[in-house]
Image (cartoon, coloured by chain):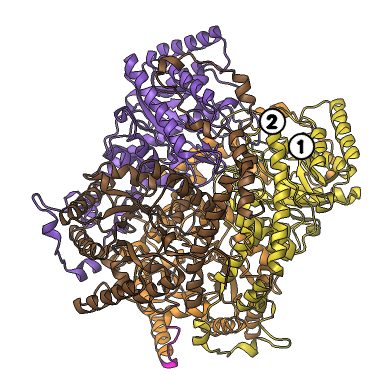
Chain colours: A brown, B purple, C orange, D yellow
Amino acid sequence: MTTDGYVPAPADRFSFGIWTVGWQGVDVFGPAVRPPMPADRAVRKLAELGAYGVNFHDNDVFDFDASESERDQRIAAFRQALADTGLVVTTATTNLFGHPMFKEGAFTANDRDVRRFALAKVMRNLDLAAGMGARVYVCWGGREGAESGASKDVRAALDRYKEAMDVLCQYVLDQGYAIRFAIEPKPNEPRGDILLPTLGHALAFITELEHPELVGVNPEVGHEEMSGLNYAHAISQALWHGKLFHIDLNGQHGPRYDQDLRFGAGNARGAFWVVDALAAGGYDGPVHFDYKPPRTEDDDGVWESARACMRNYLILREKVRAFRADPEVIKALADSRVSALSEPTLAAGETWRDVRAFTPDIGALAGRGMAFERLDQLALEHLYGVR
Amino acid sequence: MTTDGYVPAPADRFSFGIWTVGWQGVDVFGPAVRPPMPADRAVRKLAELGAYGVNFHDNDVFDFDASESERDQRIAAFRQALADTGLVVTTATTNLFGHPMFKEGAFTANDRDVRRFALAKVMRNLDLAAGMGARVYVCWGGREGAESGASKDVRAALDRYKEAMDVLCQYVLDQGYAIRFAIEPKPNEPRGDILLPTLGHALAFITELEHPELVGVNPEVGHEEMSGLNYAHAISQALWHGKLFHIDLNGQHGPRYDQDLRFGAGNARGAFWVVDALAAGGYDGPVHFDYKPPRTEDDDGVWESARACMRNYLILREKVRAFRADPEVIKALADSRVSALSEPTLAAGETWRDVRAFTPDIGALAGRGMAFERLDQLALEHLYGVR
Amino acid sequence: MTTDGYVPAPADRFSFGIWTVGWQGVDVFGPAVRPPMPADRAVRKLAELGAYGVNFHDNDVFDFDASESERDQRIAAFRQALADTGLVVTTATTNLFGHPMFKEGAFTANDRDVRRFALAKVMRNLDLAAGMGARVYVCWGGREGAESGASKDVRAALDRYKEAMDVLCQYVLDQGYAIRFAIEPKPNEPRGDILLPTLGHALAFITELEHPELVGVNPEVGHEEMSGLNYAHAISQALWHGKLFHIDLNGQHGPRYDQDLRFGAGNARGAFWVVDALAAGGYDGPVHFDYKPPRTEDDDGVWESARACMRNYLILREKVRAFRADPEVIKALADSRVSALSEPTLAAGETWRDVRAFTPDIGALAGRGMAFERLDQLALEHLYGVR
Amino acid sequence: MTTDGYVPAPADRFSFGIWTVGWQGVDVFGPAVRPPMPADRAVRKLAELGAYGVNFHDNDVFDFDASESERDQRIAAFRQALADTGLVVTTATTNLFGHPMFKEGAFTANDRDVRRFALAKVMRNLDLAAGMGARVYVCWGGREGAESGASKDVRAALDRYKEAMDVLCQYVLDQGYAIRFAIEPKPNEPRGDILLPTLGHALAFITELEHPELVGVNPEVGHEEMSGLNYAHAISQALWHGKLFHIDLNGQHGPRYDQDLRFGAGNARGAFWVVDALAAGGYDGPVHFDYKPPRTEDDDGVWESARACMRNYLILREKVRAFRADPEVIKALADSRVSALSEPTLAAGETWRDVRAFTPDIGALAGRGMAFERLDQLALEHLYGVR
């Protein structure tokens, strides 16, 4: 039992997907190692640990082929747990990847009936989500993609993806739901190549929609790192575009299968910069964890890992604050001229004419060191906790 | 000497960077293995091989610290070679990565004087490029990035990147140059993480500019594949956005150092789909090669590799056409319902109300095979030349 | 229906894992899309397609918790299908990764009872394998590894791995089974990091065993390519050590999740060199495919993909032979001095004293081109089928 | 100025390659940013920082084409600096990758004269190394490899590699030098695929040599991580084989170009386990850093980064000791049954007959959690310095 200050509280706005702690451990090479976890149990346990909210797929709460009464019963239990614990539903999403009918996509399935049903499934869950107070609706198109070149007309697929998002935006507008969408990019797995493979591709796509203002991104640490990309850079660009509607925090070891490690595990130094980037950019959404307790863990291990996600965020948040407040860091930042980048290249009133013939002291600029190693070492020592 | 039909002609619009055949083989572990190649020699040899055009950095033609007279002399020789051979300058670009002053970036360097000089250097070369008839101006920000977290304020860097592009767009507008810009993304190398790391990030960035209509992308096969991304998908998305202003064709073996292999080498199957995607999407820019003749090659090997780039494109173009015309392929595409994806999900006049309650025969859709393996095998056999 | 010459026959010695065509499509994100396939059905269908043999896990034939009578019944059906079709069991293996008890390893599980049971399970299946005539027994330790640093004492794990292999070697010796073992390396998935992650690590490990002569390797295309390694180089090194006891052919797109594409798909150019390396090195084991028909396929697609694996091997085999017989290739190999590498560096009778002061014409060697691009282009044109 | 306890002293046995702090910053995209650093200056500065020893390539001390007198003069200055400072030469190596003559390899170059000269060059430097007291001689075959399939006969290349190592082993034996060799693996860069790409491949290769006892490995953090492999696992396997003769510590961000970051930067969590594995395995060689001060740094930044390499090792060494001594960790290790793996699977006197019919309580083993998340979180909190 830890007795230090890294104890999560609702004010920290930590949230979890129901499917995270509920993951049973099925993978390509083996079946479930843990029993199913009803959504209401997940809610109650997460509340005990200090979480603030949850995110759910429709089929985290009730099975794909649940009868109406089963569905209602499961939802009622879920609602009761929320009511009892005070946890909020910050976010919801639809499972458009599990059922065999979605084996080739949902919004971009070649089969039009699959596409139509996918829209219906989302709309139905949007009703539930809105009723539960969700403000963000995540769209992860995990099966929207291809293993082979001719099987998917990518430009047509993007037309259909846009159509789907346009229809759904219209739906929430018409229904008056206070919900915005967040597209979650991923490069591959379970498909060979997934459409909108990175945060960048999703941000570009959004600009083509009918209601771009309603749609942002939900980047996941591991998904960007599977492409070898810097997640802190990614979320900084999303913040720059005003599009960081949600985040999925977890851990990964670079290009390989989707590991979904607990936050903090994986790229530990990257995690420090993630927390820094969120603070610097003023992210104010839920601090959401999308990870999988490893298959080696029993129920105790599940909660241990969930607790650790929040704890690591709190530890890193404290470190980041200390780093930014450290006088030596402030001096090192100045030595590296970091804030000089915030100064416009052209002074007020200048145009290209004012720099067209600009010639600096090239030798001096060439020889000048940036002192980045000093600065980065200070950051690393804050991570280590030795400053 | 090959006497088959894969002989490039200017009508094929093949172009090369001067720096490609001119690469001397300097890498991190060893010095030059080949003598410098004057730009005019590159032009004359490429013309002999059947190329249509060239692309150049300012410092491919004259050295960074060339005197005015040296500069003029080198440009004159370059112009003369173009005039003698009929090769056109399709594209130009600026070296903002070689000189030590750019060690930390150019448009996004922390040092403001570096940023100002970078703009001046581009404007000066834009004059030259416009005078030579270039219609595309490539911006590869190879040093715009960071190895460490605090050294670069990413959001400020994007502000400066935008500022630079806005200034340069205004410059070409004010000068009346018929030039459009194409941003070339790259994830890393020579910097630890480069800003605008993929085509997607660049496409998103462009939408924030003052003149987005003047700016598109120049994706390079190897750069996207260094992130494990599917280049054919990437250019298809760029075409979907109307932003594929230029392409850089070469070869790569996945996430590792930037190999810049000749086109066709590397991901051979991917190359087939690249040629297919360009044809399907109506790309009409120059078919540009940006590769490096390996350090093992002497001058003969340089030209062998350049010839092979064009030859491989012609071979693949023929294969792609045969594939698309093959009746078995047409049938297989139908079996895979590929064209059904071009049909809108909602029929004309339908709204979300028409699909809100849609329930298909789920079992039938779940059980239906997509026949993608058959289709992909046909494609592979066209690549193999056994059909 | 293809009527060309690429029709597999038993003399080609193609074999498949029962689990390949039998894969139901369960992955981390969705359940089965195809019904279970009894082993005897797989055998009969593979025989129709022209296969020579099969490989099986114990639990491909009967379930982990099958009763003795169920087990006997399933084995009998399997035997009958083999007898009816003439297919041989070339290879067998044990499922030590599926059952939850193996969630943390089998031969190297921390829990000693798991290790003891794993040995028992293998021995029991060795009896079955020997009775069916298998000559190779594959050991894939898919769960032998770790996601976190302290959880596994790697040196102790290697001790236990060695102990397990030593016990099993003694078992086959004592039982008089004509069986050799082949260790199958994999870097990760389903574990974060798997022990013996590449062919090299496995080759080194084998030298420490009590009976190294009984143990070789079974490298899989995708497993080595998941580490970004060159599979043709890998099997050439295995052949050099005399340790290529078996191969697992399939397709992969570099470092990402284990794709198990059909052979030929994935790295098409790499596949050409794989077939070349097998021929050059005199590999005489079964030509085994370990792939997964994509989840998009129905039963027809399963067989289409199985057929294509063999067909692609035959196509590539023909190409490789044509490449090696092509007079231009022979000349190009000479120009590249490839065979000069087979000449010892020291002449017969020479010692280090004869080269201690050797000084060649350094300038000449430095300037000499290797003509590799010419040679490689010839290979690529054989792959393309345009020569 | 840091005044804490993380101050390196010679007893810590830290060593650096002369080429590390001496790296001028030449890369594929730009020339030198720092002036050449004479070896004697590197020695004097490293001594000031608290280093114990150095490693050098012949051409770190004198140029490839230095005259004899230049060579003698540079060596004398190097020796004087060593004498003045007390730094020792722990290790030496030969540059067989820089000069254009080695563009296609050295020990495995197709051109026999290159191979012969490479041996001569190494022998000559072995004399120097022995005279300076080096006990380890590193062989990094950075150009031994290929970009294309037919250009290198891999099995012949391994024959020549073995021949080279056998000749060199005989040389040190005949000369009576107390030197052992350490092969340094790397997967790629500067060649497309390098022979002996991982520690495993090198370990296997060594077993085929005439004097395997004289040859071990020198694994580099970044080189193994470029293949996505776990470096702590790698060195644990090397220690298990008794072959960890030397280490190259630095930092890397997974599969991409060779970053050569300072130790601690890159995979910070991995670095913790590296230090732990070295301690647990009893590694007693020099703690060697092979990194490159980033091109952004001036001379001050060079020394800052060198100092930080040592400092980070000391910080991590303290953390690892605290982790292993922490009573909660000891309990958590027991809960995870980590030490149970050191118990042989078969008891003393048991044979396979004793486990052939072993049947444990399968349900109990399947349901038992491993408690690895708890254990790993304790490790992470030690890394964070919050315990």
Amino acid type of disc 1?
Phe
Quadrant of residue C36 within the rendered picture: bottom left
Chain letter of disc 2 in the image: C
Question: Mark 1: few, some, or many residues within 10 Å (few <14, many ≥20)?
Answer: many
In this picture, is C131 found above or below B306? Answer: below
The one nearer the camera, D151 or A94, is A94
Residue C365 is marked as 2
Quarter-of-image position of residue B283 = top left
- Residue range highlighted in magenta: C63-69
Q: Is residue D99 visible?
A: yes
Horizontal side of residue B302 vs A244, given as left or right = right
State the mark number for residue D117: 1
Query: Is residue C68 highlighted in magenta?
Result: yes
Near mark 2 (Cα within 10 A), the count class, few <14, some 14-19 or many ≥20, is: some
Residue C127 picture location, percent across and down: 54, 84
Query: Relative to A254, is C349 on the left or the right?
Result: right
Q: Main secondary structure of the magenta part?
A: loop
Identify the residue at the far left of this view.
B349
Q: Secondary structure at mark 2?
A: helix
Along the viewing direction, whichever of C290 and A255 lies nearer the viewer: A255
Could you tell me which residue is drawn at 58 percent across and 27 percent down? B24
Q: CA distance from mark 2 to mark 1?
A: 11 Å
**Between D305 and D20, the one nearer to me in the picture:** D305
Query: Is residue A106 left or right of A148 when viewed as pictured?
Result: left
Q: Is residue C249 magenta?
A: no
Q: Is residue B135 visible?
A: no
State which chain disc 1 sits on.
D
Q: Secondary structure at mark 1?
A: helix
Is the C-beta separation of discs 2 and 1 under 8 Å? yes
Q: Is residue B220 above or below residue A116?
A: above
